Image: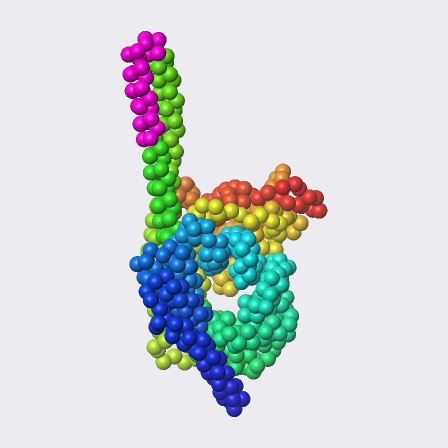
């Protein structure tokens, strides 16, 4: 305990020294602000002051940025407005308010595109890429970051070049492509000459790569370099996002006593500055630390805080995902309307020109009869061509109208599912949490209720995962990331995932997939397909029966079947199986719940991977779901793709 007291006292003194040094720099900017006039220079000064604070205290940063936005608007200062909106977008991103971050960043991007401001474009594209990361659209994010790098490189904008390279490295880390991640992180360090602070983010990524490789001592070295840079610049976010990683590395090394001071320090820091994502990660690792020390009393206390925060953040993130989809839908609708108005204007202009030409022809016909006859022939030909153009344009307009109606229908479906189907399990989850929070439970009762709580969380988490995956498939440009996939290995992973559920119902799952079969598909998509099909088989199987996952090769395709001996389906249920709104989810044989979206997602992902899905079922006998995918290889033979 004495060690912890000395550690916290040292930390407070160090932070006090750094904050004092930072305050002196901030005070000098505030002093300049007090003497400046309400002109464009004041806009730049307010935005500079906001940028200085945004990694230290986002609330103060946002206050200065909003003052700058109001002044830039009143002055009509377009260049300053672009810089300010980009800055506000990043502040909202740090606070996790993605819908506002997206709106501000898009507005800033349009301004900088109009001005040809490559510096501003690089900053905005980095913001938009970061928002794509939060939506797990890593491939889209990489495109944003590479475009940001090109703009920054053309004007020698070093900090944005390094930032873009770091972000690319982070995307590859999330995609588990560690060599590519290391390559871009090292490039970022090399291209950020004499920029120790920004290079610190590269060091943190290198630490995460070492952690993923199991080299925890090396990861700690990189994390310490990052912390030194964070302390030197008093960057609270960089500090908070590194400390819990340090604690995790110590725990993996079997040193929970060394992990605890860093995690406890980060709890205070993350709470103070509202870094809820970092606080959630810290709680999660604290539970591991206390459990490793057999201090289950403290572990249970932190577990309760973690569940409450996780539930709150999950609800907030879900709301933000919906707000993001609404913002993107509004953008698509706005752009489509602009395009329709433009085409309508062109058609009217064409019609006016044609009428003017006819007047000239008629006037000329008074001079000579031959000219009249020639003009009439030309007018007839032009009229036919114009009718053809108008017909084609009308077809385009009708198609765009259909696309807009489809987008609106998708949005309404999504809101309906969330507003009705998820409300019941979430209310059940809230009731269990209130009981755990308020009741005087014994330790044994707490463990029993914790299992119920986990079961509800698993149900809601799985439904939300399906829901967000389905929503992504509705977005334009969503595509499969094709590669080699070992189906048997994925089936084994799902069997292990559902071990508790199968044991509870006395089920056995037999993996009879040929281990030599390799398909050409998106690994994450095939994983989700199997997870839903096996989960459904478990849900509707009778107790003490078998589930079989088998395969066969037909020409250049592999067919994978998931078969159960469950309650089966009627012909009417089969005919409505993939019709949105008609396949109302049924309870499982032990009253398991769902939102009826899993099979829609299976069908869309199978087709997205150039496959097909078929179903056979008989009431009281069972069901069999079979999907086919293109083969990459089988029994050592390579098949072209």
Q: Is residue 117 magenta?
A: no
Q: Is residue 326 left or right of residue 533?
A: left
User: Relative to 73, is 612 above or below?
Assistant: above
Front residue of this view, candidates 574 and 340: 340
Q: Is residue 369 magenta?
A: yes
Q: Quadrant of the C terminus?
A: top right
Quadrant hosting residue 67: bottom left
- Residue 576 x/y as whole percent: 39, 43
Q: Residue at x 38, y 58 (%)?
A: 81
Q: Residue at x 54, y 70 (%)?
A: 197
Residue 303: tell me if it is visible: no
Quadrant hosting residue 175: bottom right
- Residue 285 x/y as whole percent: 51, 74
Front residue of this view, candidates 306 and 206: 206
- Residue 253 x/y as whole percent: 62, 76
Q: Residue furthest bottom?
A: 2
| Secondary structure mainly formed by the magenta segment | helix
Q: Residue at x 41, y 69 (%)?
A: 49
- Residue 617 x/y as whole percent: 47, 44
Q: Is residue 244 left or right of residue 483?
A: left
Q: Residue at x 51, y 44 (%)?
A: 608
Magenta span of residues: 348-372
């Amino acid at each position: 305990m004495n060690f912890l007291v000395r550690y916290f006292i040292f930390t407070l003194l160090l932070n006090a020294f750094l904050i004092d040094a930072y305050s002196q720099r901030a005070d000098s900017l505030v002093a300049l602000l007090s003497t400046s006039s309400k002109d464009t220079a004041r806009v730049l000064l307010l935005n500079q002051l906001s940028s200085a604070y945004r990694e230290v205290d986002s609330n103060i940063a946002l206050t200065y940025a909003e003052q700058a936005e109001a002044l830039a608007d009143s002055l009509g200062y377009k260049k300053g407005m672009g810089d300010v909106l980009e800055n506000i977008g990043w502040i909202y991103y740090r606070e996790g308010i993605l819908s506002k971050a997206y709106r501000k960043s898009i507005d800033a991007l349009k301004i900088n595109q109009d001005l040809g401001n490559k510096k501003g474009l690089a900053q905005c594209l980095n913001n938009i890429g970061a928002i794509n990361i939060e939506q797990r659209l890593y491939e889209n994010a990489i495109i944003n970051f590479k475009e940001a790098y090109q703009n920054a490189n053309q004007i020698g904008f070093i900090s944005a070049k390094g930032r873009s390279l770091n972000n690319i490295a982070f995307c590859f880390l999330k995609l588990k492509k560690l060599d590519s991640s290391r390559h871009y992180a090292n490039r970022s360090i090399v291209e950020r000459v004499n920029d120790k602070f920004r290079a610190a983010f590269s060091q943190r990524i290198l630490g995460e790569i070492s952690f993923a490789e199991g080299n925890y001592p090396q990861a700690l070295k990189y994390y310490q370099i990052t912390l030194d840079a964070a302390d030197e610049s008093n960057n609270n976010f960089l500090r908070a996002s590194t400390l819990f990683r340090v604690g995790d590395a110590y725990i993996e090394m079997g040193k929970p006593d060394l992990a605890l001071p860093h995690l406890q320090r980060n709890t205070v820091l993350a709470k103070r500055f509202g870094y809820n994502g970092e606080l959630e990660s810290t709680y999660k690792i604290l539970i591991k630390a206390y459990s490793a020390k057999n201090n289950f009393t403290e572990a249970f206390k932190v577990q309760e805080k973690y569940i409450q925060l996780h539930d709150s953040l999950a609800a907030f993130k879900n709301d933000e995902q919906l707000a993001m989809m609404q913002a993107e839908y509004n953008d698509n609708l706005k752009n489509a309307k602009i395009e329709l108005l433009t085409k309508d204007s062109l058609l009217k202009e064409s019609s006016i020109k044609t009428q003017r030409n006819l007047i000239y022809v008629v006037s000329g016909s008074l001079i000579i009869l031959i000219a009249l006859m020639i003009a009439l022939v030309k007018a007839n030909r032009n009229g036919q061509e114009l009718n053809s153009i108008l017909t084609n344009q009308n077809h385009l307009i009708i198609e765009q109208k259909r696309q807009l109606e489809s987008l609106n229908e998708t949005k309404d479906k999504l809101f309906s599912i969330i507003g009705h189907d998820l409300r019941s399990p979430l209310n059940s989850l809230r009731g269990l949490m209130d009981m755990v929070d308020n009741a005087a439970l014994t330790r044994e009762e707490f463990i029993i209720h914790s299992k119920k709580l986990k079961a509800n969380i698993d149900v809601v988490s799985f439904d939300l995962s399906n829901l967000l995956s389905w929503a992504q498939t509705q977005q334009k440009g969503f595509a499969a990331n094709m590669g080699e996939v070992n189906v048997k290995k994925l089936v084994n992973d799902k069997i292990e995932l559902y071990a508790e559920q199968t044991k509870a119902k006395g089920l056995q799952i037999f993996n009879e997939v040929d281990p030599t079969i390799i398909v050409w598909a998106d690994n994450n998509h095939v994983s989700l397909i199997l997870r839903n099909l096996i989960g459904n088989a478990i849900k509707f199987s009778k107790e003490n029966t078998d589930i079989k996952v088998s395969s066969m090769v037909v020409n250049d395709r592999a067919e994978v079947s998931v078969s159960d001996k469950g309650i089966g389906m009627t012909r009417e249920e089969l005919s409505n199986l993939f019709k949105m709104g008609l396949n109302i989810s049924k309870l499982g044989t032990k009253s398991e719940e769902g939102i009826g979206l899993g099979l829609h997602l299976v069908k869309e992902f199978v087709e997205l991977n150039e496959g097909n899905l078929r179903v056979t079922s008989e009431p009281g006998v069972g069901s069999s779901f079979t999907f086919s995918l293109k083969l990459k290889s089988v029994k050592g033979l390579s098949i072209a793709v």
